[in-house]
Image: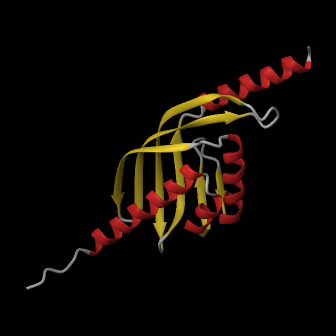
Amino acid sequence: MRVPTDPTRRTDAAGRAMVRRFIACINRGDVNGLAGLMTDDHLFIDGMGNRVRIRRAMARGWAGYFAMVPDYAIEVEDVFVRGRTIAVLGFAGGSYVSPSTRRSAGTWRVPAAWRAVVRRGRVAEWQVYADNEPIRQLMRRADRRRRSRRTR
């Protein structure tokens, strides 16, 4: 007698796999790959609660972010799945490159968490929970350096 497969297990595995693919695209800086994994009405929520809706707008947002932090990476420590919602715990970090000087102002790494909602095989929501202060400090430092070079 064959035991029926638990459909939730398949859904959980599919959601987990989708989020891992999404993170792999982030770690490669692959904007087109990310856009291909988002729903048309994708919602991104950053660590400050700012929202960007619509895949096309978020693809532009990722492109701008990867220009600023070209080696941005997510290190996954743990993943939890409940239905369509996937929680990821780990670390985020990279090098901040000042848009004005195009030089690295330093690196940052923070503990972080992400919440994804997967719908119809795509990422419908991506929410970041992370302390933005370390990268903001690098931005301020780069800005001070740029201003001090101007006054010389």
Residue at x 50% of width, y 55% of height: 24
Q: Nearer the viewer, residue 129 or 107?
A: 107
Towards the viewer: 23 or 86: 23
Is residue 38 something one can see in this rendering? no
The answer to whether residue 79 is above or below residue 112 is below
Residue visible at 46% across and 52% down in the picture: 115
| Residue 141, position as x, y percentages in the image | 72, 22
User: Outermost residue toward the right?
Assistant: 151
Taking the spot 60% from the left edge, 60% from the top edge, the residue there is 43
Measured as percent of width and height from the top left, residue 119 is found at 48, 70
For this orientation, the residue located farthest to the left is: 1
Residue 108, image x and y in percent?
Answer: 57, 30
**Viewer-closest of 86 and 94:** 94
Left/right placement of residue 8 relative to residue 68 reads left
User: In which quadrant is the C terminus drawn?
Assistant: top right
Query: Which quarter of the image is occupied by the N terminus?
Result: bottom left
- Relative to 13, say whether 25 is above or below: above
Which residue extends farthest bottom?
Answer: 1
Q: Is residue 134 visible?
A: yes
The number of callouts visible is 0
Horizontal side, residue 65 vs residue 99: left or right: left
